Amino acid sequence: MKEKLSIEEIHKLISLMREGFSYLSKLKEKDPVGKHINYFKVPSTLSESIAIHLLRRQQILPALSDMTFEHNNKEADIVAKNGDDIVNIEIKATAESAFQNLGKKDIQADYIIWLHFGAYFKDVEQTQISAYIITKPELYFKEPGKINLSKLKEMVSDVETVDIDISKL
Ligand SMILES: [Ca+2]
């Protein structure tokens, strides 16, 4: 099982990410060729750890409040259980370039939780991120493929959005 993060470790990793973004921003401005440097991806350990804390506190998917949540790397990123009831949850994360690959496993999951950080790592004043929750993604997506946030909102008209204040985690 993958190692996951405590709340304290989440905040530490976020502050390292912000340091990294700030350094890369400086390099990007230092010389015109700097613009070709890419920012880091959101580490999946970070997004999955944030998601499991939010699920356990019922800040997202409160309908699953009688279930326990575990990290898993076989069936889905997070598996919720209550007796024989099993719910598979896939976690996606994006920063500003809001592209994601939807795989077969994502489409077949019971839920996708998409954490959108936007400028969160660049802008140290920003405390909020958004969680988009897609119920039964197979109803909306037939084939695996690339997707961005605006396409998601267009295809999943009833996508549920929850604002998350990371500083209150
Ligand atoms: Ca994932």
Image: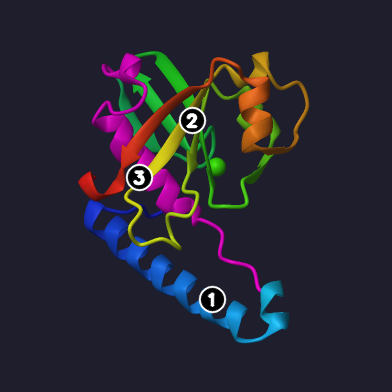
Three-letter amino acid code of the residue under disc 2: Tyr
Q: Which mark is residue 132?
A: 2
CB atoms of marks 1 and 3 within 8 Å: no
Q: Write the residue at 65% across / 43% down.
A: 100
Q: Write the residue at 49% across / 57% down.
A: 43
Q: Which residues are magenta?
A: 37-66
Q: Rounded to the nearest whole Å, what is the CA distance between mark 1 and mark 3?
A: 22 Å
**SS type, badge 1:** helix
Q: Is residue 140 left or right of residue 111?
A: right
User: Looking at the image, is 143 positioned above or below residue 71?
Assistant: above
Q: Please name whichever residue, 75 or 139, is drawn nearer the observer in this view of the structure.
A: 139
The residue carrying pointer 2 sits among few (fewer than 14), some (14 to 19) or many (20 or more) residues within 10 Å by Cα, namely: many
Q: Write the residue at 40% across / 43% down.
A: 129
Three-letter amino acid code of the residue under disc 3: Gln
**Residue 41 visible in the displayed image:** yes
Q: Rounded to the nearest whole Å, what is the CA distance between mark 2 and mark 3?
A: 13 Å
Q: Rounded to the nearest whole Å, what is the CA distance between mark 2 and mark 1?
A: 28 Å
Q: Please name whichever residue, 136 or 147, is drawn nearer the observer in this view of the structure.
A: 147
The residue carrying pointer 3 sits among few (fewer than 14), some (14 to 19) or many (20 or more) residues within 10 Å by Cα, namely: some
Q: Is residue 149 left or right of residue 68?
A: right
Q: Is residue 48 inside the magenta stretch? A: yes
Q: Write the residue at 31% across / 19% down.
A: 62
Relative image position of residue 82 (x, y in whole percent): 32, 17
Residue 157 position by quadrant: top right
Q: Quadrant of the C terminus?
A: top left
Three-letter amino acid code of the residue under disc 1: Leu
Q: Which mark is residue 24?
A: 1
Relative image position of residue 131 (x, y in whole percent): 44, 34
The residue carrying pointer 1 sits among few (fewer than 14), some (14 to 19) or many (20 or more) residues within 10 Å by Cα, namely: some
Q: Which mark is residue 128?
A: 3
